[in-house]
Amino acid sequence: MTSTVATDAPTADGDGGGSGHDAYRAPVDDVLAALDVAGLDDLLALPDFSHVERDAVALVLAEFGRLAAEVIAPTDRVGDRVGARFDRGTGRVTTPEAFHVAYRHYVDGGWGALPFPEDLGGGGFPSVVALALQELFASANLALSLNPVLTQGAIHALAQWGSPAQQAMYLPRLLTGAWSGTMNLTEPDAGSDLGEIRTLAEPDGDGTWRLTGTKIFITWGEHDLTDNVVHLVLARTPGAAAGTRGLSLFVVPKRLVTTEGVLGEANAVSCVHVERKLGIHGSPTCVMAFDGAVGELVGPLHGGMRAMFTMMNAARLSIGAQGPAVAERAFQHALAYAGERLQGRAAGVAPPARSPIVDHPDVRRMLLVMRTRAQAARSLLFLAATHVDRARHDPDPDRRERSQQLADLLTPVAKAWSTDSGLEAASLGVQVLGGAGYLEEAGMAQRLRDGRVAPIYEGTNGIQALDLVTRKLPRDGGRSVHELLADVWDFVARPVADDDPLAETLEVLASVLGVLEPTTEWVLARLATAPEDAVAGATAYLELLGTALGGWLLARRARLALDGDGLDAARAVAESNFFATEVLARATGLARPVTAGAARVAVLLEGGAA
Amino acid sequence: MTSTVATDAPTADGDGGGSGHDAYRAPVDDVLAALDVAGLDDLLALPDFSHVERDAVALVLAEFGRLAAEVIAPTDRVGDRVGARFDRGTGRVTTPEAFHVAYRHYVDGGWGALPFPEDLGGGGFPSVVALALQELFASANLALSLNPVLTQGAIHALAQWGSPAQQAMYLPRLLTGAWSGTMNLTEPDAGSDLGEIRTLAEPDGDGTWRLTGTKIFITWGEHDLTDNVVHLVLARTPGAAAGTRGLSLFVVPKRLVTTEGVLGEANAVSCVHVERKLGIHGSPTCVMAFDGAVGELVGPLHGGMRAMFTMMNAARLSIGAQGPAVAERAFQHALAYAGERLQGRAAGVAPPARSPIVDHPDVRRMLLVMRTRAQAARSLLFLAATHVDRARHDPDPDRRERSQQLADLLTPVAKAWSTDSGLEAASLGVQVLGGAGYLEEAGMAQRLRDGRVAPIYEGTNGIQALDLVTRKLPRDGGRSVHELLADVWDFVARPVADDDPLAETLEVLASVLGVLEPTTEWVLARLATAPEDAVAGATAYLELLGTALGGWLLARRARLALDGDGLDAARAVAESNFFATEVLARATGLARPVTAGAARVAVLLEGGAA
């Protein structure tokens, strides 16, 4: 018998398989080291976290790490191959059976409640610890991990803005993950442009609202993992102002709920299309139709943007965590392959012996870029998240304010720099595997396909750079960035012994600061006189700042390790010096891309091809 | 009726479609400008090309450009969606009907014969012109374009090494494309490591040989576009030396051919598997089984490597051409999208008006990186190919020798830098489209999936860097690179007027040369004393050299345009200055990555995840 099959187009047979090199182990020690560098000890010393010990954090990481490695990671391939399936007739989305099993473990473990206040039924842990778990989840299965990310965003919004009745209705189920949440922002003609939103919410007379409109790019907008889906929807009310000031936030459940909390009939909201994407095939990206769906106002009328930003800010760091997640998974896979694959001979190896490719300097270089970018990215994210926690929990209002400013400044940098790093690492992972990496069978191609989305969603990285340069940087005349740079200088300028093993790192870091400081002043000055010049260099500035901070954080990790807190000091030092000479040093070339001004992009482009 | 379909896994329904922004127009003027910069006029002044005028080249480009745009480009999506299909029972590979139509046009136009000598039935054009056509073909349909690339490699090998009988048998059909060719090098345990090849060729007593073994990653190894497939196969003969010195090259047709040239019975060679890949789904990547297949020796016994290098060197530039091909196609698509997609307001635009995203500086920056990398890459490739032509056709033996050296030096740089540029441009294309870019429907994702292969095959870009630094650079004590850098200095150091519109480019180029020159000397010195240090910086050195040459070639293009040869001088100048400030300037940060030495990669990596 013969059978003709498409050879390249992925089939939906869920072959699982893989090359055997793509098992995942949670990098618990590296994550803990990044938490330490971000200031975990100081954070846990705050009164609000008096019940949380560092050992408990380590235990949580180890335990969730086992779940991620043993239960969630094996579901990753089938999610890619089979993906979320859409039934056009019923509007239902079904996910692979393996997803149900993994998600049930997540719910049963109570992991979703970890970072929320104890009075809401949460674990009362800092959000930075939850962010660390999100990285592990995303490494194990990026597509599935998006579901809890969205749920946590919905919890944040309802916890801050919901009425007591709304909180009582939704928070217990969202905290466990029995129900999931979504963010409904984007519309066909309103991507980054929320002011163009047209979905209409009309009062129903009984205190509820009826929502009508279409939302696109709704992650996990419809699925079969939970009994209910809680949509948080930006919409415009009749007579409201144009633009974003006229938007309000509504909660719209997939299934209506009685006041006793019993699930009732279906609401008039449905999934009408699921997108076919480059990657994250297991995460249904839905077009949602609201057809007079019943919703309740969340927070003040016309206060939609502020409420939505509550969700978005948390989500930006969660999406940022996909950067180290992708980089780490790709690194582990590439390292396992490189240790076995024989090819050529490294220096000093005589024929007929052959060397595993991990012994070739250029392969080691690629692996080390992957690993150090993962560690720098998670350190940067954790630093931002630690300030988010301090902004909420520090008893001192001035320190709260300072941490809020730093969190605001660091969030776009952490989101963009980390996700760019994840993408670069995934691409390097394909390169390390060579021809094998280009075959879907090996599984590395999925890293690249999955990892490509993170620089796009939750605000493209270009939007992050714009936010950084035009909003976050100039606040208070640049006070936050000046304080941050002063911290870095303080680290660099400390007198060191001649035989300091970090001498090379410190030298490169100083030279990068020598570029970062004047370009920062240039950007601040131009914002006042010729803002388009600052905007034209925004992406390069973000890259410069993110790389400098990454180098600083890796160096601080090495310093901590040398001071003897139990880490592998030799590895931490070597990685700091490697990152400094390979990645950080390149940032010295960014002065001109930042400061070249807007005139250089004022080239005629309309011509298209000649 | 309801139907459950996989939503994300590509289906094989060949929806063609696309967003309407991915039409392709051949950038004939830009290609001609790159040919001019590479020295087309001087080349055509050689006696061997006395029958070729620049106008004829322009005509060929325009005519093939129309074929590429109107006939070939519309087959690109179906090739991705349906792909090459493998019948396990018969071992046959079938390609979409649209491929047959496009390929027939290519054969009927006689395009494949263009660069071969007239006495072989060729057009007698320089190979650099054929390379330009390959770029256009690859832009239009990368997967299909690989078929002629391999055929041209086979022609080169047979034209140089084949016996008169072999040439008479194969060349006429290969030149037209009535038959296609392949390169059979790689084996399961021998990727970049040809010395490990085990395929055995045993003498048959009648002058022919019998080949037995398995070859993998054989591009277009089996397909239905031509009546015959002519395999050129590296194999080991009984008793031959170990390693590459024991290899010989054989020609093994898919179907045996009588001395009268009539197709006879099937040879004992068959396709046993077709790989499922990230991209280029329309190009079957075959596992070929040789089971006592009849072959003839090509060239001297044990001369396989030299003969194979004849094919590989030509193929490296052809694969390099996929860099600008992918970048150009992605650029055109992104520009068309950016001109229509409304989002936010650019500086100076008042509400309620909205701006097409092409008006946002960061989007323009991305588009200009794509366009200038495409132009720099094609200029670099054409410079290398022009020296290939001069090495064959210059009447002066010294100049032939010098051009050969320069071609050898430039080929790895052009292959790696160009394909890295293509990949970066494809990824930027996805970023310009944002969320839409992540949907397969838009077609940009295919650019990224297709473009990801070029840095891998025909020698990974890491292998190219190794070849550059350890073989090409040190020849004659670095004479070729010194001469090349002297040419660049000569261009930079020419006295210019104060109001020279290229002043910014020249300033940046001079500063990059200030980095390139000492690092070149460092690499040459280390090769003698501590070669592992030079090897550890090879990729960064290739990036530095490639970027510097790209900046120089774009500047020369602008200078030519300013001198008034009919190009759009304003655009050429603006693009040169843009590339200098955005891309070239970054290369000043490469000194340390090149020279940091091997110690920094001697980090323990065995630990894997902590």
Image: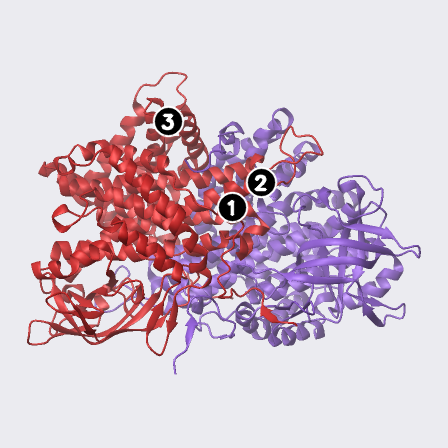
Chain colours: A red, B purple
Q: Which amino acid is tagged 1? A: His
Residue positioned most to the bottom: B1
Q: Chain of mark 1?
A: A
Q: Is residue A606 left or right of residue B103?
A: left
Task: Tell me if mark 1 has few (under 14), some (14-19) or many (20+) residues whose alpha carbon lies within 10 angstroms of its own.
Answer: some
Residue A21 image label: 1
Residues under labels 1 and 3: Cα distance? Answer: 36 Å
The residue at which mark 2 appears reads as: A340
Looking at the image, is mark 2 or mark 3 earlier in the sequence? 2
Q: Chain of mark 3?
A: A
Front of the two marks 1 and 3: 1
The residue shown at (52%, 45%) is: B547
Residues under labels 1 and 2: Cα distance? Answer: 9 Å
Task: Tell me if mark 2 has few (under 14), some (14-19) or many (20+) residues whose alpha carbon lies within 10 angstroms of its own.
Answer: few
Q: Which amino acid is tagged 2? A: Glu
Residue A523 image label: none
Looking at the image, is mark 1 or mark 2 earlier in the sequence? 1
Badge 1 and badge 2 both on one subunit: yes
Q: Which amino acid is tagged 3? A: Leu
Looking at the image, is mark 1 or mark 3 earlier in the sequence? 1
Image quarter in which the C terminus of chain B is found: top left
